[in-house]
Image (spheres, rainbow, N blue to C red):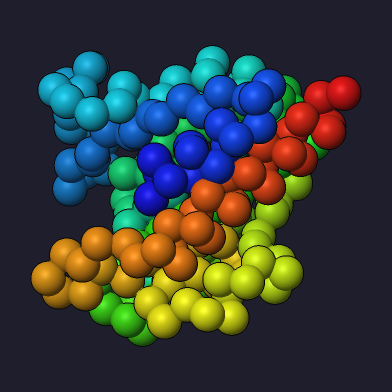
């Protein structure tokens, strides 16, 4: 999903998407991964957040909520909140779950709450996006979503289109705000 959102962002030529991840946490809710990931995107830093033009935040759904590792990361952003570093920047969210009614919308909303507290401008998917009325597996006005099913089903073309539309909307908004 993150790659599809990034593709949408990069349809706006002045924007560059940077894929990042956060470390897993232990049962004690402390970072439990090495300082640099073994593979995949690098870990996000507070400095990268401070200087971003916009933020697309994604997480798997865990009982209708974001994953503990993302919550732990967001709990570390008080410094950015105190300084107002993210105020006025656009943000959006996306999620995936293995069950069709696994809490995708509540996950999107729980991810939005810290962003709103930071003063970010929350962007969802407007119903002007044709895919919202055509989707059979994922996609909400709160953000992009994907139903993986128990077999790890790949995103269908409508879900991919909604992810790209969400990224494009984020980039267009960031570009307008940066003018």
Q: Position of residue 93 (x, y in %)?
A: 53, 53
From the top left corner, tell me how far across and down residue 102 is, in percent.
Answer: 33, 78
Q: Would you place residue 169 above or below residue 48 in this image? A: below
At x 49%, y 45%, the residue is: 5
**Residue at 32%, 51% in the rendered image:** 68
Query: In the image, 62: left or right of 170?
Result: left
Asked where in the image residue 177 lies, by quadrant, the reply is top right
- Residue name at image x 54 percent, y 16 percent: 47
State whether residue 38 is above or below residue 26: above
Residue sitting at the far right: 179
Left or right: 168, with 137 as reference point: right
Q: Quadrant of residue 32?
A: top left
Vertical order, 68 against 140 (above or below): above
Residue 83: give x, y in percent of width and height.
72, 23
All told, the count of numbered labels is: 0
Quadrant for the C terminus, please. top right
Question: Residue drawn 45% across and 67% down?
Answer: 158
**Residue 91 visible to an observer of this rendering:** no
Residue 85: x, y in percent? 71, 25
Q: Quadrant of residue 148?
A: bottom left
Residue 176, can we see it?
yes
């Amino acid at each position: 999903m993150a790659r599809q959102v990034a593709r949408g962002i990069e349809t706006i030529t002045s924007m560059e998407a940077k894929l990042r991840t956060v470390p897993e946490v232990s049962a004690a809710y402390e970072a439990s991964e090495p300082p640099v990931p073994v593979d995949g995107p690098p870990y996000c830093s507070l400095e990268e957040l401070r200087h971003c033009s916009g933020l697309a935040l994604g997480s798997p759904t865990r009982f209708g909520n974001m994953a503990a590792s993302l919550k732990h990361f967001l709990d570390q952003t008080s410094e950015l909140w105190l300084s107002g570093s993210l105020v006025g920047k656009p943000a959006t969210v996306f999620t995936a779950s293995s069950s069709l009614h696994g809490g995708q919308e509540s996950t999107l909303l729980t991810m939005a709450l810290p962003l709103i507290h930071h003063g970010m401008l929350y962007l969802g998917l407007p119903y002007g996006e044709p895919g919202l009325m055509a989707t059979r597996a994922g996609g909400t006005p709160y953000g992009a979503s994907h139903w993986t099913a128990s077999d790890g089903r790949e995103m269908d073309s409508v879900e991919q289109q909604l992810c790209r539309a969400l990224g494009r909307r984020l980039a267009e908004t960031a570009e307008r705000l940066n003018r």
